[in-house]
Amino acid sequence: MQNKKIAVEDNLTDVKQALQQRGYQVVSPQQGQDAAAMVITGMDENIMGMMGITSSAPVIEARGLTTGEILQKIENKLQLQ
């Protein structure tokens, strides 16, 4: 089990489910200050208050990517940490 925390925007349901199936703990970006990575679409940054969140975690821009591509990017980033 991975047991790493990944912050994912609420509207990325497929990504959240796929991460949970792989054993990741999925939280909202607002709760992801200590997350290993963040997945955002970039569309709702100001509305969701994400601009005020400070994190050293890698940020994956999900726009235009498939769920599989997003998962691969997350796993690649986590291997580099």
Image: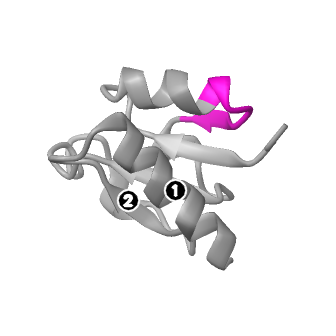
In the foreground, 68 or 50:
68
Locate the N terminus and report the quarter of the image it occupies.
top right
Q: Quadrant of residue 67?
A: top left
Question: Disc 1 marks which amino acid?
Answer: Ile
Residue 60 lies, in percent from the top left, at 38, 59
Locate the C terminus and report the quarter of the image it occupies.
bottom right
Q: Given contact means CB atoms under 8 Å apart, are the residues at marks 1 and 2 in contact?
A: yes
Range covered by the magenta-colored residues:
20-27
Q: Quadrant of residue 24?
A: top right
Up the image or down, 25 lies above or below 51; here it is: above
Crowd class of label 2 (few under 14; some 14 to 19; many from 20; radius 10 Å): some
Q: Label 1 vs label 2: CA separation?
A: 7 Å
**Disc 1 or disc 2, which is closer to the eye?**
1
Q: Which callout, 1 or 2, points at the residue further toward the start of the chain? A: 2
Residue at which label 2 appears = 60
Residue 64 lies, in percent from the top left, at 15, 47
Up the image or down, 20 lies above or below 45; here it is: above
Residue at which label 1 appears = 74
Tag 1, which secondary structure? helix
Q: Quadrant of residue 47?
A: top left
Residue 71 lies, in percent from the top left, at 48, 46
Question: Disc 2 marks which amino acid?
Answer: Ile
Crowd class of label 1 (few under 14; some 14 to 19; many from 20; radius 10 Å): many
Residue 64 horizontal side relative to residue 21, left or right: left
Up the image or down, 20 lies above or below 64; here it is: above
